Image (tube, helix red, strand yellow):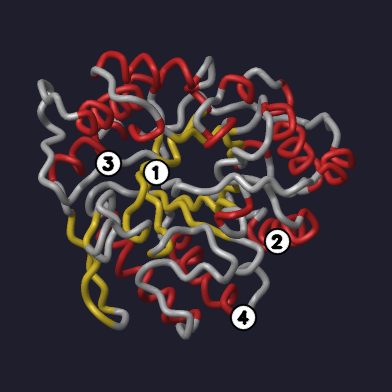
Amino acid sequence: MTPIRRLLLVPLVAALAAFGAVAVTSSPAAAATNSFRGVNWAVLGDNFSTGPLVISGLSSSDSYATVQAKANALYDDMAAIGVNTVRLPINTHTVGTAWWSAYRGAIDAATARGFKVILAYWEDGAASGGRITNTAAWNTMWSNVTYLYGANTNVYFEPMNEPHGYTSAEWRNVAAAWMSYHYSAVPARTLIGGTGYSQDLRDVCNDSRFNGTLLSFHHYAFFYTAMTYDAWRTHVQTRLGNCASRAVVTEFGAPMSTGLNYADANSTDNFVRHIRAVTQVMRDNQMGGTYWPAIGGKPTGTSGFDYYSMFALSGSGTNLNLTVRNTSGKDRLRHGWGL
């Protein structure tokens, strides 16, 4: 989930000039994306970091085998509600490090059980203003990732999460250049984020350089003023443009620890209306989605957890457990997936 951040724009003029508008060979787009039934597994404190990304439940001292065992324990509980996809964060301070050797256990445990994994780059620290801070390091990171997982058909690549520091034209050039440079990341397993906070797909949808890709879409109530249920549905559908068939709602969420009833079609609560609308648009368009977050995220107040989190984490060592915080929220998520 996007934290409130200062927009400190870091110049990348030289890099963008080098990128230019590159033609990309595309492959046929998917007819629907509802095979992505997922959640985000995030760092407690959020994924915007200038250090290695140690996602919630893991420890920086964990070995590959320990990470794999912890991940499998959590994936068992996620699968119990229908999850078959996990979106995991990466950054330039994680990939290629000693921690990366262990962190890969979370990726490998997921793919071994047939889960899809979306690897998404989070900018290296919240103060970088929605831009790539070091293009060379970013490309090196992705070369490492695509070399390891380019042939794994369960692994998907998202070049950047919420590229809001770029204009639409800049971002589309950056993304097109990424695809040309990282040719082992086939378009059909690449998710290009929408403009802004990945919240508008229309320009990306209409750019023929991305015809063969999937698209990453974010939608939160806090992005906008309160609306009726019908207005939320129209709002979401409008920002998908003509590309709902290729879109995955890689982030959406609402409070799960406050007792809201997401089964109430007559609710006047804005969060309830919003989640009901997003999940209905997903179901109507046979779209997949990865809820934000399963665990981790930005702690709310002094609670020690993100109140959007779908699960409460308990246990110790490799004996970890997840408990659903809100049954009606879980049921609405499954509704969105088409279950």
Residue shown at 65% from the left, 76% from the top: 97
Q: Amino acid at mark 3?
A: Ala
The local secondary structure at tag 2 comes to helix
Whole-number angstrom distance, CA of label 3 to CA of label 2: 32 Å
How far across and down, in percent of the image, does residue 13 sit?
Answer: 83, 42
Q: Amino acid at mark 1?
A: Thr
The local secondary structure at tag 3 comes to loop
Whole-number angstrom distance, CA of label 4 to CA of label 1: 28 Å
Kindly check if marks 3 and 1 are in contact, taking CB atoms under 8 A apart as contact: no
Between 233 and 13, the residue placed more toward the observer is: 13
* Residue identifier under label 3: 254
* Residue identifier under label 4: 98
Q: Label for residue 141?
A: 2
The local secondary structure at tag 1 comes to strand
Whole-number angstrom distance, CA of label 2 to CA of label 1: 23 Å
Q: Rate crowding at label 2 as few (under 14), some (14 to 19) or many (20 or more) other CA atoms within 10 Å.
A: some
State which quadrant residue 206 falls in.
Answer: top right
Q: Amino acid at mark 2?
A: Met
Kindly check if marks 4 and 2 are in contact, taking CB atoms under 8 A apart as contact: no
